[in-house]
Amino acid sequence: MKNKILKITENVLLIKTIKLSLVSLFSNLLGFFIPVYIAFEYNISKETDSFFLSYNIILFIGVVFSGAVRSVSIPYLQERIGDSFKFNQFVSSVYYITFIFFLVLSIVLSAISYVIYLDTDNVLYWYLFLSTPIILFTVINSFSYGILNSMGQFNVAEMSPFSRAIVIFGMIFMFKGTFGISAVIIGYNLGEFAKFFHLYYVIVRINKIKISLINTKFSLLKEFLIEGSSQILATVISASSPLIDRFVASFLLMGSISLLDYGDKIFVVFNVLLNAFLSILLSQWSKDVISQKFSLKEMNRVIVLIFGISIFLFVCVYFSRDLIVNVLYPKVSVSNRVSIGMILIINMVGFVFNSMSQIVNRAMIALKSTNLMIKTSLIKSIFNIILDIIFANYWGVLGIAYANIGVNLVGLSVNYTLFYRKFKYIKL
């Protein structure tokens, strides 16, 4: 027994994951309760449906680019970690090109949304207009995560959501009566802005990384942009899944979008834990690829581990779903709470398959084979549309949740098969 405990304490990856998970849980704890607070302050209505749809559109655009910038940058940063000049030069180049591009994109999207709102008077476009700055800061903040993760400062990076959540709660509390649900959107904007300054201070002031326009060399970014573009395209297709779900739900009974969102948000805590592990895993595998130590056997071992943990979490949630939903959403009607509980359980099944698939994705990124993710995402997206329409016709909003199980199972199967075939021809 003593030897087993000693072996566990000597597992560096496990210890890092546990520490980062605890930090992530603490820093994201307030963020986890944001949708709960929204449900407490605002009734399920057409307005909340419009808010959640608009936010998911903005989230879709942000996730498409932020995920690529954060994860794809790590292997390139790891290659330059030993040379401060090259490291600073790469950071400066990515930072400035990202800032300029997404500033322009945010301004354009904001202008388009405002013009459409004036023409249609549809509140959805007003919410989109207010939300567009979130895209800029989400992407910039994601690159800051990548910088800190590549330097092994996982805990420092994961503390930033705490300041963001405080700002959001403050805005809702103080201005819910004045701005209605728009106070939530303003809070998200200011929260991402606060998060930006938090991360920027840590990178520039504490770590002494020199971000300067003079130090940029955009020719260094060719390979990075190619790899990033592959993941962006894959993420565009993959991240469209929640958007497709909400779009199909918009044709169902009023409040269907809100129910989906509340059911999705409950298990965000498990995604926090998974992402903490994935951040460390990607950094480690990037180093292993450089030193030619990456192995398929190791990846399979990690997949089995994640499968076991996610099954355990599913069982825990299955037997406690009523307690969870009743505590978090006391003001929601009993029938809606039952639906939210069912959506939670169904989503947890999908989470089991998706978590294993994410392990394969990190291996692809470490090996700079993100083009494989495009094929998987395209197949998943096609299944998503077909299954959503068929299942929603039979089971309504629950059918959309059922469809995600099939989509994630197909995604895992295709993802692993493509990677396994490719890996046989990769010479590290």
Image: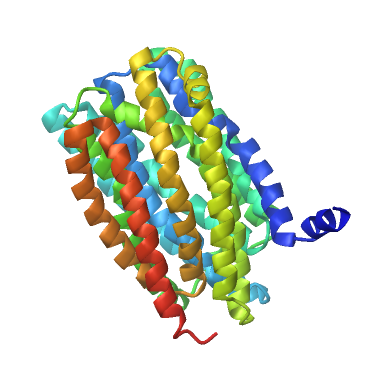
Measured from the top left, where is residue 263 in percent x and y? 40, 31
Rendering quarter of residue 270: top right
In terms of depth relative to the viewer, which is nearer, 197 or 426?
A: 426
| Residue 82 picture quarter | bottom right
Residue most extreme to the right:
2
Residue beneath the point at 49% across and 75% down: 367
Q: Nearer the viewer, residue 416 or 77?
A: 416
Q: Position of residue 424 (x, y in %)?
A: 46, 83
Please determine whether, in this image, residue 26 is positioned above or below residue 426. above
Image quarter of the C terminus: bottom right
Query: Where's residue 407, x and y in %?
Result: 31, 51
Quarter of the image for residue 331 reads top left
Residue found 46% across the figure and 79% down from its top: 423
The residue lying at 43 percent from left, 52 percent from top is: 354
Residue 269 visible, this angle:
no
Foreground: 191 or 304? 304
